[in-house]
Amino acid sequence: MMLTITLKVTLGFIALMLVIRLMGKKELSEVTPFDIVFLLMLGGILEETLYDNKVQVWHFLYAIILWTVLSLITNLVVRKYDKLRPFIKGEPSILINKGVLDIKELKKNKMETEQLLSLLRQQGIFSIREVKYVILEPGGQISVMKRDSSDQITTDTLPRLIIDEGQIVNRTLNQIRKNEQWVINLLKKEGYEDIEKVYYAEWSEGKGLYVQCNE
């Protein structure tokens, strides 16, 4: 029993290392949902067969080899037929284009503005107005191009999200000691009479109001 488990673990370890090498450095640096499923399935195969005496070592190796071959074939097909890539591997989405938040793309990718802001903050960016382009990669990471130095707007105070997806963010108002009427008056002062048309709005003491409306 112990010898069989040892043999399975050793062969599984070697097989997984070979698979990772076959995937290549580019694949590892650009992990897609398809690759995650592939790796999870390999781990699942190893887990299910490890303590099952009915599953022989050769059955285990065959399963890993078959799964790897299917993955490699899929990668080859994707490289040869570009039209299939969006369906299998996914494709990048431009969430901010020339400084404008693309609401349709945001909704298409089932991403909330708060999630986008969180990803931006992880890159040291605290306001949408600081960026020119934001691209959501197939693996879930974002690529950011900041505004040029000529049009870069620096922020001397932390921008606050006051309207998110058309709704006033009351927790932000509590933090800055403001109320909903203050938001309405602020929007009207900037020419936004109908608050229902405002999809996103942020405010800071230093730079004022930044608004993105529904299309």
Image (spheres, rainbow, N blue to C red):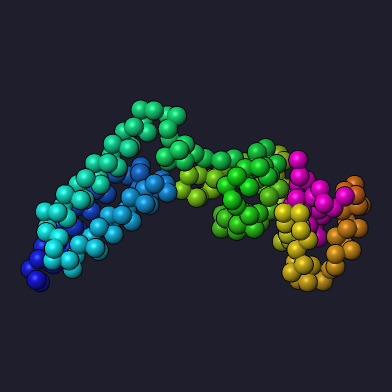
Q: Is residue 121 above or below residue 21?
A: below
Which quadrant of the figure contains the N terminus?
Answer: bottom left
Q: Which of 46/127 is in front? A: 46
Q: Position of residue 10 (x, y in %)?
A: 14, 61
Image quadrant in which you'd find residue 26: top left
Q: Which of 186/51 is in front? A: 51
Q: Is residue 141 left or right of residue 131?
A: left
Q: How many numbered marks does the figure carry?
A: 0
Q: Position of residue 5 (x, y in %)?
A: 13, 67
Q: Is residue 131 above or below residue 60?
A: above
| Magenta stretch bounds | 194-215
The stretch drawn in magenta includes residue 45:
no
- Note whether residue 120 is visible: no
Image quadrant in which you'd find residue 175: bottom right
Q: Is residue 132 left or right of residue 188?
A: left
Give me the residue at 42% from left, 40% from top: 88
Give me the residue at 52% from left, 40% from top: 92
Task: Identify the residue at the far front of this view.
Answer: 54
Give me the residue at 84% from left, 68% from top: 178
Which quadrant of the figure contains the C terminus?
Answer: top right
Give me the residue at 15% from left, 60% from top: 55
- Note whether residue 39 is visible: yes
Q: Which of 48/209 is in front? A: 48
Q: Is residue 171 left or right of residue 29?
A: right
Q: Position of residue 84 (x, y in %)?
A: 42, 32
Q: Position of residue 139 (x, y in %)?
A: 46, 48
